[in-house]
Amino acid sequence: MERQVVERAREAFLSGKTRVLEFRLQQLRSLQKMITDRQAEIATALKQDINRSQYDTALFELIGIENEITLAVGKLGEWAAPRPVEKNLLTISDEVYVQPEPLGVVLIIGAWNYPWSLTLQPLIGAIAAGNAAVVKPSELSEHSSLLLRALLPRYLDQELYPVVTGGVPETQELLKQRFDHVFYTGNSTVGKVVMAAVARHLTPVTLELGGKSPCYIDKNCDLRVACRRITWGKFANCGQTCIAPDYILCEPSIQSRVVEAIRQTLLEFYGADTKSSPDYGRIINLRHFHRVMSLIEGYTAVLGGQSDPSQCYIAPTVLKDVPPHSRLMQEEIFGPVLPIVTVSDMDDAIHFINEREKPLALYIFCSDKTAVKKMIAETSSGGVTVNDVMMHYTLSSLPFGGVGQSGTGRYHGKHTFDQLSHQRACLVRSLGMEAVNLARYPPQDRRRARRARLALRSPMIDFSKRTFVWAVSATVVAFGLVVTLTVILLIASGLNCTCWYWEGWYT
């Protein structure tokens, strides 16, 4: 079945209809209509999958999707247009540009923690870039997966954008097929499997993975505000967010104050009984529940620690003085557990971060701008947010993606369009002016070689529309200034000319 789905998608792509911008725009608008029409059904599915509140559904999933579609619809003509590039003397009379082209058929493997946004946002870019796309939602978010399979064919072209549901066997079968790009969101273990599977076809990949995103708190910052923002980012979606703060780094002198500030914030956010709060989620299934609980075995929680396997409930949990080499610090937690590791100062924190794999995100809470610049300059991560958490993800203008073990490639806004397009280099010239090419033809001599070298080493010249407009405007202004200055000088010199009388300068 999976093979036939891919073959039909490729046939539909080869028909050429996705190359027409108006078709892409129509598909994007239809996807927007689906989100608008089906918000209630989507919210119900997420409530069943992960106990997501209807308000968080809009905040964490739907608004981002709608913003991406609006941006793509408004900017598609600009993104898809040929982009003129600089020329040298040998190509000065040629038409030279970069033309974005569709890659072909893209496989999008979504994630279960945000099953709508992490599946549909890559799809938006695939549609905008003119590709066909096979969509494989995660089987773990079962209700969302089945709803997406039911809805997408009603709004989008069924052959170009089919949905394949199922578990590991179906995904493995899809990965045996030849795609032109594979976009995977999930953990690094499966990411390696995906990369190895598609290597036989030399298929490029975008891997949006995760890792342990550190959160450094400087002792001189506003701890109340810092802990409020950290608590929101860590425990939203029950800690199941790839860019959630994975652990806190701070000096021992402020550790107890940090714990107390988090305790007060949890009370404010979820009340005295977190389990009954409509704003607090659940772990996706029992397997992940037991995985998270095993990570905190042997620790005494200073906050939380309660659990209920019948509801896949784990209370927001904070641990103090966690050893740097414990199991808890070796793998991504991906749950509502927040360890605190003490460091002596910022330099020690930088050393701690650099000893480990490059994280997907880095969070710095510090009021000293010089210290912030130092930490950014001396560390590496997929993204960084200062004095807040996760907010860099919300900007379509910023590329979102990992580095090293936290992922490869980037997306959001135009970055998704570029990631799923081939940037085709184009040079168009006439068959005239053949004398210009003589320097490159044999038989070669010293004079021809010198001419060719001079032409090839000539400075690159920008002939883009913006540069042309600027040059013409500057020329007009300069000419006007010269004329004005000449007139002023003539008047100042007292030169009498018949033209002055004719223009009324003198009476």
Image (cartoon, rainbow, N blue to C red):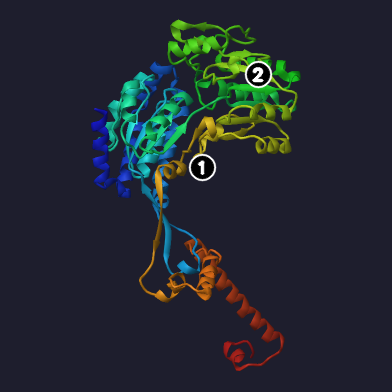
Between 73 and 278, the one nearer to me in the picture: 73
Residue type at mark 2 is: Pro
Residue 95 image point, x, y percent: 41, 64
Query: 168 left or right of 214?
Result: left
Q: SS class of the residue under badge 2?
A: loop
Q: SS class of the residue under badge 1?
A: loop
Badge 2, how many Cα within 10 Å: few under 14, some, many 20+? some
Q: Residue at x 38, y 19 (%)?
A: 140
Query: 374 left or right of 167?
Result: right
Residue 428 image point, x, y percent: 38, 64
Residue 255 image point, x, y percent: 71, 18
Q: Tell us which disc is closer to us: 1 or 2.
A: 2
6 versus 352 height, above or below:
below
105 versus 336 height, above or below:
below
Between 432 and 238, the one nearer to me in the picture: 432
| Residue 338 lies in quadrant | top right
Badge 1, how many Cα within 10 Å: few under 14, some, many 20+? few
Between 188 and 383, the one nearer to me in the picture: 188
Quarter of the picture holding the N terminus: top left
- The residue that label 1 is drawn on is 397
219 versus 305 height, above or below:
below
Is there a contact, CB below 8 Å, between mark 1 and mark 2? no
- The residue that label 2 is drawn on is 324
